[in-house]
Image: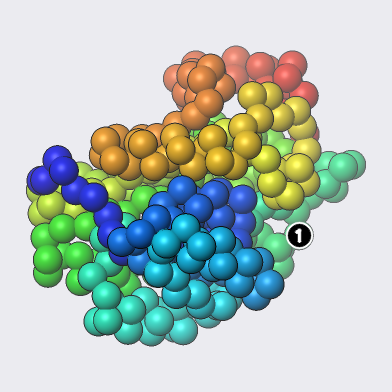
Amino acid sequence: MKSSFVPETIVITGATGSIGGALAKAYAEPGKTLILQGRNVVLLEELKGFCEARGAKVVTRVLDLRDREELTTWLRETCRREKLDLIVVNAGVNINIGPEGEGERWDEIQTLFEVNLLAAMATVHAVLPSLRARGEGQIALISSLAAYFGLPVTPSYSASKAALKAYGEALRGWLGPEGIRVNVVMPGYVDSQMCRDMPGPKPFLWPPDKAARSIKNGLARNRPRISFPFPLNFGTWWLSVLPPAISERILRLLDYGG
C-alpha cells in the first residue's frame, strides 16, 4: 500500500452537515475536485461557492440517501467519469428517547437505519468495484464514540454507529491487502444542530473545523480508528471494556441514563 497516497478527487456525503461541510472546506484547494452530496440546496450552493473560491472544482448533488437505487446509480456514473480517491461516508441522523423517556418512534428508527447504515453500506458497495479494479483508494466511515457502548438516551443511533464501526473494521481487514484504505472515524461531540438536539451533557465539545483537521490528519496517516477528543475517547473505550453493570452505573452518574 502506498504511504504517500494523496486524494485529489473526494466524495463527501452529508456535506451540508457540520462535519461534512467542515471537511469540504478543509480539502478545498487548487487541484482538488470535491463531489458533495446533501439535501439542503441553499447550504450546498453556499458550500460550493466557498470551496470554489478556495480554488477547488466542485460538483454537487441534491439527493435523499434513502433512495438507494438513485444513490447507487449516481455513484456508479460518478465512478465512470472520475477517479475517486477518497469517499467520506458522513451522512447521518440522530433520534433519542425523548425528554420524558417515552421512547423512539418506529418510523424514525427505520429512517435512521436507512440513512446511517444502509445508505452507508450502499455507498461503499457502489464505489468498491472501481476502487478494487485500480487497487487504490480510501473510504472513511463516520461512526461515533457512542459505538463503544450504547448510550441509553440514543439507543438506535448508538446501534447504527456500532454496526458501522464493525463494518468498517471488517472492510479494512479485507481490502487493505488490495491497496484500499478503510478508516473508521469516531467523533465525540462536535458542535451542530444534531449535537445540540441530543439530550445529556456534551463534554469536550469541539468546533467543526477542529474535528475536520483531526479527521484529515488521521486519514493522511491511514489510522484504523480516528477518535477524538481525548480524554472522552479514552473514557468511552473503557465503557466497552468494563463489566456492563459498571458502565451502566457510570452513565447514570453522568446523566446519560435515560
Type of amino acid at the residue the image marks with label 1: Arg
User: Where, quadrant-wise, is the C terminus in this rendering?
Assistant: top right
Q: Residue at x 77, y 32 (%)?
A: 200
Where is residue 146? Give x, y as percent.
56, 36
Q: Residue at x 46, y 38 (%)?
A: 213
Residue matched to label 1: 105
Is residue 139 toward the left or the right of residue 129 in the image? Answer: right
Q: How many marks?
A: 1
Q: Residue furthest right?
A: 100
- What secondary structure is marked by label 1? loop
Where is residue 52? Give x, y as percent.
48, 66
Is residue 50 toward the left or the right of residue 28 in the image? Answer: right
- Image: 227 above or below 237: below
Name the foreground residue: 119 vs 2.
2
Where is residue 87? Give x, y as percent.
35, 60
Name the foreground residue: 156 vs 220.
220
- Corner quadrant of residue 92: bottom right
Name the foreground residue: 53 vs 47.
53
- Corner quadrant of residue 188: top right
Pointer 1: residues within 10 angstroms few (<14), some, or many (20+)? few
- Image: 176 above or below 137: above
Q: Residue at x 40, y 35 (%)?
A: 226
